[in-house]
């Protein structure tokens, strides 16, 4: 069994936990473990963890995929570098209702992570930053439009993060 760790990162309230909640619903028969604690306002305390046990269609690989959210609150920011250093891929949840500059500042925390997927979330909100502007700002990464609360773009983002992580791992094994 191959293990992957995918970290969902972004500004507080960008939709990181919502992504994990939707994936838990969609893959309910494959949930191996779930940890989630939140405040009365719906904010995540510390971090979320969802572990899925899945079989890929490619080569029939069995995967144990642990999904983590980074804490959006600054007081827990010391945990983020450790998470980024121990991950197979990162999903950056871009909050389309906040400025590109704010999102880029949060994105820079990822550092030198090699495998990144950008999810342009909250596409349903009036006044959302145009998708083309987001794609231009993140030209080096795949950008997937989403409305996580409706489940739109959630699976596509997840599958792309898994695909890129597996592709990256294969390259690493071939060169070592």
Image: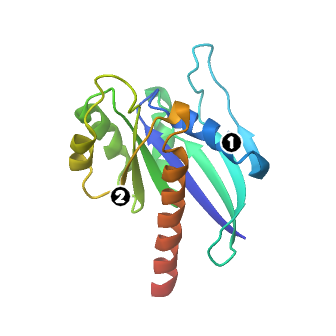
* Disc sitting over residue 24 in the figure: 1
- In the image, residue 111 lies at what x, y percent? 35, 52
Left or right position of 169 against 131? right
Left or right position of 117 against 103? right
- In the image, residue 76 lies at what x, y percent? 50, 32
Please tell me in which quadrant of the rendered image residue 43 appears: top right
Q: SS class of the residue under badge 2? A: loop
- In the image, residue 68 lies at what x, y percent? 58, 45
Q: Residue at x 75, y 48 (%)?
A: 31
Q: Residue at x 21, y 48 (%)?
A: 136
Q: Residues within 10 Å of mark 1 (few under 14, many from 20)?
A: some
In the figure, 14 relative to 66: above or below?
A: above
Please tell me in which quadrant of the rendered image residue 101 appears: top left
Q: SS class of the residue under badge 1? A: helix
In the figure, 31 relative to 88: above or below?
A: above
Q: Which residue is mark 2?
A: 112
């Amino acid at each position: 069994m191959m293990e992957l760790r995918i970290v969902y990162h972004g500004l507080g309230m960008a939709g990181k936990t919502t992504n994990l909640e939707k994936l838990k619903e969609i893959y309910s028969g494959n949930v191996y473990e779930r940890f989630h604690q939140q405040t009365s306002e719906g904010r995540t305390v510390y971090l979320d963890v969802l572990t899925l046990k899945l079989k890929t269609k490619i080569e029939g690989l069995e995967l144990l995929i642990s999904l983590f959210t980074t804490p959006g609150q600054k007081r827990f920011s010391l945990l983020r570098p450790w998470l980024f250093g121990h991950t197979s891929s990162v999903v950056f949840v871009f909050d389309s209702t906040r400025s590109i500059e704010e999102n880029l500042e949060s994105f820079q925390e990822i550092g030198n992570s090699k495998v990144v997927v950008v999810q342009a979330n909250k596409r349903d909100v009036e006044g959302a930053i145009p998708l083309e502007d987001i794609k231009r700002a993140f030209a080096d990464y795949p950008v997937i439009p989403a409305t996580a609360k409706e489940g739109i773009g959630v699976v596509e983002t997840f599958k792309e993060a898994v695909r890129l992580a597996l592709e990256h791992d294969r390259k690493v094994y071939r060169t070592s």
